[in-house]
Amino acid sequence: MQRTGEAPLAPHAAANAPGVFITFEGGDGAGKSTHIKFLAQLLEEAGLEVVRVREPGGTSIGEQLRAVVLDPANAEMAPETELLIYEAARAQIVAQVIEPALARGAVVLCDRFTDSTLAYQGYGRRLPLAFIEQANAFAAKGLVPDKTIIMRCADTQEKRGRVASREAMDRLERAGGSFHERVNAAFDDLISEDEQRMSIVETVGAHSDTARAILTELEDFFPWLMDGTCNIEPQLAAFDAAHRLSHTDEATS
Ligand code: TMP
């Protein structure tokens, strides 16, 4: 895909840096990583620097913290400990990866960020939201995403299947049905407080339909992806084909 003209990248909301910071949120198994990967490919093919990260993780320290917080063997972990581990991993990735990338002008695509902490530790674990907001701002050094896509899997059966089919459920996935119901409901509350930054994308239909919905939400940052300047139809078709292939593999394995 060739991009013509300059990419109209929006100035960063919080850090006054030239990059674009986009986060993806949602319950477990909503298909975030598949769509982040596809978006990253489109933007890279257009010549942009894309930094793809996930929380918790994305740094050596963060990945070690991730292993601790998600390890099902740590069943005795107190909610307060859990919160501080997520914030510690965040402080590291913001300082080490995200801030420098935004300062360089990169597009940073982050799989989960501060809204996950409000949803999981706030609504899920029932820790005080006001404290979490302060801890989030401290760990993220005040960095606020330019845009947050909340991905929601309409087909609960499919979502459950995706999570259940993983080798072993991690500690958070084992947290129980009512915990996850509170987390999913949390995103509706969160979006009502910041409708300009946050948008919900339902993962229904073909992968290309969901991808189009995401790109439409990101039109302010990358209008050339959807206004006909670029022909992204081949990429969308390949995305669907790859997904069909992986379903066939699953069915035959
Ligand atoms: P994931 O990378 O597979 O989404 O796993 C991360 C898990 O950690 C997921 O269950 C959501 C949870 N989580 C929190 O509970 N709080 C947080 O702040 C973040 C970033 C993730």
Image (cartoon, rainbow, N blue to C red):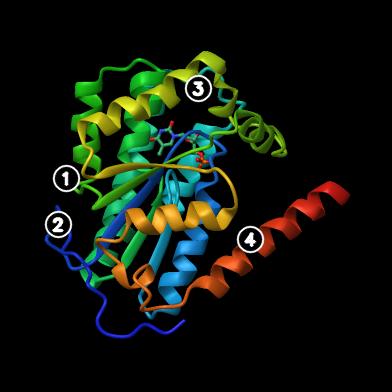
Label 4 sits on residue: 240
How far apart marks 2 and 1 lie (CA) works out to 8 Å
The reply to whether the C-beta atoms of the residues labelled 4 and 2 are less than 8 Å apart is: no
Closest to the camera, between mark 3 and mark 1, is 3
How far apart marks 3 and 2 lie (CA) works out to 33 Å
Question: In the image shown, does 248 or 119 lie closer to the viewer?
Answer: 248
Closest to the camera, between mark 3 and mark 4, is 4
Tell whether circle 3 marks a residue whose Cβ is less than 8 angstroms from ligand 1.
no
Residue 131 picture location, percent across and down: 21, 24
Q: Label 1 sits on what residue type?
A: Gly
Q: Residue at x 25, y 41 (%)?
A: 139
Q: How many marks?
A: 4
Question: In the image shown, does 2 or 11 lie closer to the viewer?
Answer: 2
Question: In the image shown, does 166 or 3 lie closer to the viewer?
Answer: 3
Label 2 sits on residue: 15
Q: Is residue 59 visible?
A: no
Q: Residues within 10 Å of mark 3 (few under 14, many from 20)?
A: many
The residue furthest left is: 16
The reply to whether the C-beta atoms of the residues labelled 1 and 4 are less than 8 Å apart is: no
How far apart marks 4 and 2 lie (CA) works out to 36 Å
Question: In the image shown, does 242 or 91 lie closer to the viewer?
Answer: 242
The residue furthest right is: 252
Q: Label 4 sits on what residue type?
A: Asp
Residue 82 picture location, percent across and down: 41, 27
Residue 72 picture location, percent across and down: 61, 27
**In the rendered structure, which disc, 3 or 1, sits on the residue that comes first in sequence?**
1
Label 1 sits on residue: 142
Q: Label 3 sits on what residue type?
A: His
**In the rendered structure, which disc, 3 or 2, sits on the residue that comes first in sequence?**
2
Residue 180: mark: 3
